[in-house]
Image (cartoon, grey):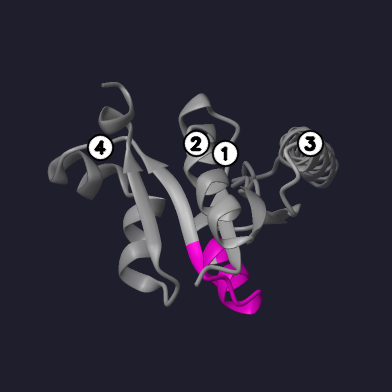
Amino acid sequence: MFERIVVPLDGSRLSAQALPFATTLANKFNAEIMLVRVVPETTVAYIPQPGGVGDTLAVDIISEQVHIKDVESVAHAKRYLMNRTKELRDQNINASYHVMEGAPARSIMEFSTERNASLIVMMSHGRGRFKRAILGSVTDALIRGGSVPVLVIRAKDTER
C-alpha cells in the first residue's frame, strides 16, 4: 500500500517525532522513507541611499554574506539528515535524504509528486485556526494543495 514515505524534517525535536510513526509504517509495508529538508532561500532587500557612495560594493558584500549563510544552512541540513538516515538504516529501513532550497510547502509537494510518494508523515503543533491563519502552515498547505495523502500527528497527541 505504501511504497515511499516522505518525512519533512526542519531540524526541530517536534518534526523528528514523526519518525517513529513513519518507521512503523515502513516496517509494516516494506516502504522506503525519504527524509526531506527544505532550506528557505534568503532574500535581502537593499534600498540604496540617494547619492550613496559604495552602494555597489555594499550590495556585493551583502550578497556574498547571504550566499555563504545559505551554503552553511544547506550543509547543516545535509549533516542532520545524513545522521537521521543512518539511524533508520541501522534499523534495516530503506532510507534516503534530500535537501532542497525554496518555499517549504511547494518544495515538499513537488518532491513528493516527482518521487511518486505514497504518503507524507509529519507533525503539527496543533495550533488553533486563528494562529494557523496568521502564521501560515506548511502542514495546512500540504493537506489542501497536494495530491499525496498526508498523515498529520498533532504534538498534543504524542504527549499522553
Numbered badge on residue 15: 2
Q: Secondary structure at mark 4?
A: loop
User: Residue 126 — which label?
Assistant: 4
In the image, taking residue 114 as reference, residue 91 lies left or right, namely right
Q: Which circle, 3 or 4, is nearer the viewer?
A: 3
- Disc 3 versus disc 2: distance between alpha carbons? 20 Å
**Lower sequence index among marks 1 and 3:** 1
Kind of residue at disc 3: Asp
The answer to if 132 sits in the magenta stretch is: no
- x and y percentages locating residue 109 in the rendered image: 51, 68
From the viewer's side, name the closer residue of 13 and 157: 157
The residue that label 1 is drawn on is: 10
Residue at horizontal 47%, vertical 52%?
121
The residue mark sitting in front, 2 or 1, is: 2
Q: Amino acid at mark 1?
A: Asp
Q: Amino acid at mark 4?
A: Gly
Measured as percent of width and height from the top left, residue 156 is found at 26, 29
Q: Residue 40: horizontal and vertical position, in percent?
A: 61, 48
Q: Label 3 belongs to which residue?
A: 90
Mark closer to the chain start, 3 or 4: 3
Q: Secondary structure at mark 3?
A: helix
Q: Nearer the viewer, mark 3 or mark 2?
A: 3
Tags 2 and 1 touching, CB below 8 Å: yes
Which is more N-terminal, label 2 or label 3?
Answer: 2
Percent coordinates x, y for residue 85 in the rendering: 75, 42
Q: Alpha-carbon distance for marks 2 and 1?
A: 6 Å
* Mark 1 burial class by Cα count in 10 Å: few <14, some 14-19, many 20+: some
Give the mark, 2 or 1, whose residue is nearer the N terminus: 1
| Label 1–label 3 contact, CB within 8 A | no
In the image, the segment drawn in magenta is 107-119
- Residue type, label 2: Ser
